[in-house]
Image (cartoon, rainbow, N blue to C red):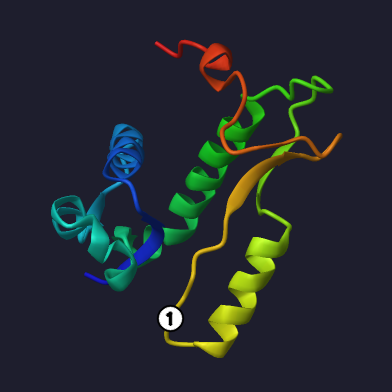
Amino acid sequence: MDLVTVKTFDSYFVANIILGRLHAEGVECYLKDEVTVTIDPILTNAIGGIKLVVRKENAPAVKQILDSYDAQYLLAATCPQCGEHAFTYIAKPGVTNFLTAILTTIFASYAVAPNYVYQCGNCSYETERLPDYENNIEDTN
């Protein structure tokens, strides 16, 4: 059985939520390196995080399901400035990320993680957490 990685996580909780949702949809999938990252989070970057693996033939369908989860997640938030549902997750523009890119280029063996933010596509409002996400989740039971 050929297994391929379709997504990686640095959080045990998010990885298991996605795993549970996929299992509920009847998808056979597993988490690789979950125990290592959970016990010693410092190793997350060294081993590439927690990997969601599926059978090779199921990978395209699972990627499509994961994309729909991401779309639902982003559409759940309402921008406090303009009221739109147009958030995207981007590398934060600025000096810090510019210096990160330069340092990563110079010291190729030492990768520095850039900072990411959610940005409204309509008014460019930026936030580290999606606003009103908790209030916009509908009960699906």
Residue 38 horizontal/vertical position (percent) = 18, 50
Q: Against 9, is 126 above or below?
A: above
Q: Against 23, is 106 above or below?
A: below
Q: Quadrant of the C terminus?
A: top left
Q: Against 88, is 85 above or below?
A: above
Residue located beneath label 1 in the image: 110
Q: Quadrant of the N terminus?
A: bottom left
In the displayed structure, does residue 13 sit left or right of residue 62? left
Q: How many callouts does the rendering have?
A: 1
Query: At x 27% / y 70%, what residue is drawn?
Result: 47
Residue 110 horizontal/vertical position (percent) = 43, 81
Number of residues whose C-alpha sits closer than 10 Å to that of mark 1, classed few (under 14), some (14–19) or many (20 or more) = few
**48 and 31: which one is in front?**
48
Instruction: Write down the quadrant of residue 55 in the picture.
Output: bottom left
Query: At x 17% / y 57%, what residue is drawn?
Result: 40
In the displayed structure, does residue 19 sit left or right of residue 140? left
Q: Against 107, is 136 above or below?
A: above
Residue 112 horizontal/vertical position (percent) = 49, 70
Query: At x 29% / y 38%, what residue is drawn?
Result: 13
Instruction: Write down the quadrant of residue 86 in the picture.
Output: top right
Query: Which structural element holds mark 1?
Result: loop
**74 and 10: which one is in front?**
10
Residue type at the position of mark 1? Tyr
**117 and 55: which one is in front?**
117
Residue 75 horizontal/vertical position (percent) = 66, 29
**88 and 60: which one is in front?**
88
